[in-house]
Image: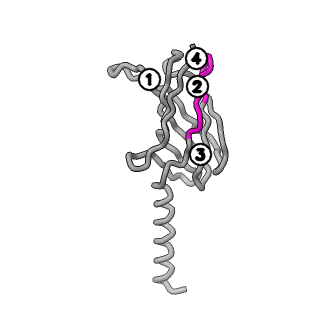
Amino acid sequence: MRPKAVVLLTLVLAFVSVADAAGPCPLMLISGTAESDAIVVTFRHGGKVPIRQLEFNCTPLRSQAHKPQNGRCREDNALFYPGGEYTVRYTYPGGKREPVRVSVKSVTFLDGTIWRPTKRQPCRVLSIRAPK
């Protein structure tokens, strides 16, 4: 193979991997339910590379503007395979049982690539309401 062809092939493969990382949302948030002590989120991994770390924004729907109470909704050491449907569970932000908005904050793939939603490539947002 010629040196120019090798360089061209390398550039094309690099561009494809970067374009895939900047592609549409790799997660489909399917459902969110409220339990007495936690929220439960079910999602499907629609990407091509396993997910190593996953982080959601978990914000009370009625949070005061001057007092943000984002909860820790994160899977630090995970392994979610493409095509799988998964369920994760988190305590209520601030420990208070109230309606919560859940959105994707970041996805870190096994190869180290990090994907974050943008205005052009958003992910679905869930509103989870605690039963009365």
Q: Tell us which disc is closer to us: 3 or 4.
A: 4
Earlier in the chain: of badge 1 and badge 2, it is 2
Instruction: Measure the C-alpha gap from mark 3 to mark 4.
Output: 32 Å
Report the span colored magenta.
Answer: 29-40
Q: Tell us which disc is closer to us: 2 or 4.
A: 4
Q: What is the quadrant of the C terminus in the image? A: top right
Q: Residues within 10 Å of mark 2 (few under 14, many from 20)?
A: many
Q: Tell us which disc is closer to us: 1 or 4.
A: 4
Q: Are marks 2 and 3 in contact (CB under 8 Å)?
A: no
Q: Secondary structure at mark 3?
A: strand
Q: Which mark is residue 39?
A: 2
Where does label 3 land, which residue? 52
Three-letter code, disc 2 = Ile
Instruction: Measure the C-alpha gap from mark 2 to mark 3.
Output: 21 Å
Vertical arrangement, residue 1 with respect to residue 132, above or below: below
Instruction: Measure the C-alpha gap from mark 1 to mark 3.
Output: 28 Å
Instruction: Measure the C-alpha gap from mark 1 to mark 4.
Output: 14 Å
Q: Secondary structure at mark 2?
A: strand
Q: What is the quadrant of the N terminus in the image? A: bottom right
Q: Residue furthest front?
A: 132
Earlier in the chain: of badge 1 and badge 3, it is 3
Task: Find residue 114 and report its horizontal and vertical position in percent.
Answer: 49, 49
Three-letter code, disc 1 = Leu
Earlier in the chain: of badge 3 and badge 4, it is 3
Q: Residues within 10 Å of mark 3 (few under 14, many from 20)?
A: many
Where does label 1 land, which residue? 61
Instruction: Measure the C-alpha gap from mark 2 to mark 4.
Output: 11 Å
Earlier in the chain: of badge 2 and badge 4, it is 2
**Which residue is at 44% across, 23% downward?**
61
